[in-house]
Every structure is written in structure tokens, then in C-alpha cells.
Image: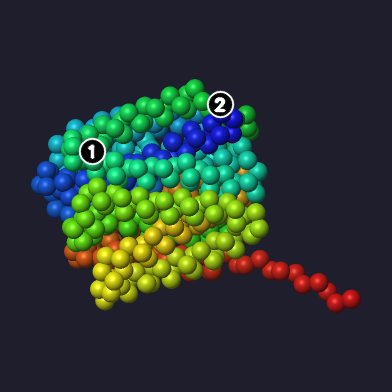
Amino acid sequence: MSPYRRLILILGAVTALGPLSIDMYLPSLPAIGRELGADTASVQMTATAYFIGLAFGQVMYGPISDRFGRKKPLLFGLALYTVASIGCALAPSVEALIALRALQALGGCAGMVITRAIVRDRFPVDETAKVLSTLVLVMGVAPILAPTLGGKIELWFGWHAIFALLVGFGLLCMLAIHFGVDEVMRERSPPLSFNSVAKDYLRIVSHRRFMGYALAGGCAQAGMFAYITASPFVFIDYFGLAPDHYGQLFGANAFALILASQLNARLLKRYRAEKVLRSTLLVYLAAAAAMLACAATGFGGFWGIAVPLVIVTGSVGFTFPNSQAGAMAPFGDRAGMAAAMLGTLQFVLAGASSVVVAALHTGNALGMAATMAFWALLAQVMLRTLVKPPRIKTPSPA
């Protein structure tokens, strides 16, 4: 295996900790509620706590990795993730599970920040979107397999075994990083202080194009997380799918995301990333609006929700790499902090999305569809307001 492919495989596996930690236990949410005596809102808070932990933990890893290198902070985060996963497997109450999920996210988010920074360290700016698209392919195997595998494990061994499996995956990622990834020789940032870190983050969030790309991509991601949070109750409780069949539906959506990410890599050979991003956000909005109409009227039943949902999740395969590459392009000297701020914005929005969709839960698909349509519209507003299309120079008349 070439060094490039080995690096992508390892970074993809580490990045997949996020989808695995979120997606694998989704078919078990109703069972967790029954066993721990918790209502739907409390069980959904185990997902919200993970999103919140991802959002705020990333702010810490960004400056640390810029100052001390990528490898040691990444290994620390993976160790914390593994220990917290052990706690989740043994959680005696829903309150304990919520707290441990937040701690699990604080460890796991190191991989989300630092893998993006490693990509920015090693590849030219114009190659970053293509590499991120390849990472989506590698990490995309996780959401295809995770819900199906999680549903089977829940049926055979109970939901505790799902977290035990995550413990093993965390340990494997630690070994892969330790033996398979070398530290990149790069200029380190100055010694850390609160003022210097605050100034650097202020410089990043004050950058108009950064915020436009970051918020547009983050809103698109938030819509997907509304689906992730609400879909077990919509499809298992409302539409009556068995947990393993729900896993297959989830896998179909993940496959659409992977297929789109690979098509994106090909389109980038002919079109600018910004053009692809603008076009696919329009597709995202149209599909979300169609799903909302079906949810409000009941038109199409199960298929009226499932078909637009595949289009929405597939659109994220385009929006994720293109928005991330556009946002990080100006910050090669602070790639870790830029990646951290990207992740923080993304999961603040994801956490808000999961809270909103839980509050709007009415026992059917309407709350999920309305939340996704809102984020689709907001993504359009953010991109068009903050990132102006490039002016095309017309040749002057002879």
C-alpha cells in the first residue's frame, strides 16, 4: 500500500469515530429509554450531549495541535475517548450516560480537528477538497455499516455491547496513529496564552469568507444531524421499521453521501468548488422543501419522506468537502485553529438542531422535516450573504 493510501485510510478511520459513535447506537435509542426508564427527550439528550462535547472540545485541540504538533494531542484524545466509552457501556442511568457521552465526545473530537489539520499541512490548497472527498469515502463506510451492525448487536447482546465495540475501535485507532503516522515538520505557533489564542480565533471568525463557507456548510450538516437525532423515532416508532431494517435505510442514505463525495472529486476537475457548493445547496433546499410538504400532507407515506431524505443526505457529500476547503484556504499558518473553529461552529449548530428537533417531536415526521428545511434555507442565506460570487472579467473591446 502506498504511503498516501495508508495515510488516508488511517485518517479516515480516526475521523469515522464520530459517525460510529453517533450512528451505531441509534437503533438502540428506544431500547435505552425502556431499560433506563427515560423519556424520549432524555434519551435524545445522549446524542445532544455528544454534539455539544464535539463543539466545545475542538476549540481546545486547535491551538494545542498548532503549538505542540498533531500526533501527541491526537493520541491523548483517543485515549480519553476509549476510557469514556468504557463508562458508557457501564452507565447505570440516563443521566450518567449523557455525561459520559459528553466526555466521549471531548476525546473523539481530537480526531475530527487534527485529521483536517494534517490534510491542510500535507496538501496544497487546491488539492484539499479532493483529499477531503476521498476521506469521506473512507469514513463513509462507517455510517453504512454502523446502524445495521448496531441494530444486530442490540438484538443479540443489548445496547451495552455497542459501546464495548467502540472501546475496541478506539484502541485500534490509537495503535494506527502511533505506528502509522509521522509528525510533519512545520513551523510551530508561538507559546500559548489566552490573549494570543483569543486574537487568533477572533481573526478567524472575523474573516467574512471563512464564516460564509463555515456557516453554510455547518447549516447543511445541522440538517443532517436533525435527521440523525429524530430518525430512529420517526422510522422505528412511527413507520414501524425493525431496528435492523432502519439500519439498512440509514446505510442507503450514507451510501448516497459517499457516492456524491466521489462525484464531487470528479466535478472539481472541471468546476470550481464554490460553483459546485452553490448548486448543490439549491438541490438540498428543494429536496428538504419536498420532504416538508410530504410530512405536512401525508403524501407518499414512508416513501414521501425517505426519497427526499436520500437526496438531502447525498447533497452533504458535496457541501462538506467544498465548504471545508473554502473556509480553511486562507489559514495555512493556523490550520489547527481554523479546523477547530469549523468543527465548533458545525457542532454548535448540530447541538442546536438536535435540541430543536427533540422539542418539535410530535410522534410523526413533521418536526424532523421542518427542522431540516429551516437549516437548508439558512445555509442559502449564509453563503449568499457572506460569500459573494467571483466577478468574471469580460474582455475589453478591441
> x, y percentage for residue 186?
63, 32
Query: Within 10 angstroms of label 1, few (less than 14), some, or many (20 or more) residues?
Result: many
Along the horizontal axis of the image, is 199 left or right of 239? right
Whether residue 203 is visible here, answered yes or no, is no
Pointers 1 and 2 in contact (C-beta within 8 Å): no
Whether residue 304 is visible here, answered yes or no, is yes
Say which element carries label 2: loop
The residue depicted at 60 percent of the width and 63 percent of the height is 275
Cα separation, mark 1 vs mark 2, equals 35 Å
Relative to 227, residue 67 above or below: above
The residue depicted at 49 percent of the width and 22 percent of the height is 179
> x, y percentage for residue 119?
56, 40
> x, y percentage for residue 396?
83, 74
Query: Within 10 angstroms of label 2, few (less than 14), some, or many (20 or more) residues?
Result: few
Name the N-terminal-most of marks 1 and 2.
1
The residue depicted at 25 percent of the width and 51 percent of the height is 245
Q: Which numbered disc covers residue 153? A: 1
Q: Give 144 or 353, whichever is nearer the viewer.
A: 144
Name the amino acid, label 1. Ile
Name the amino acid, label 2. Asp
The residue depicted at 65 percent of the width and 54 percent of the height is 269
Along the horizontal axis of the image, is 44 left or right of 187? left
Label 2 sits on residue: 182
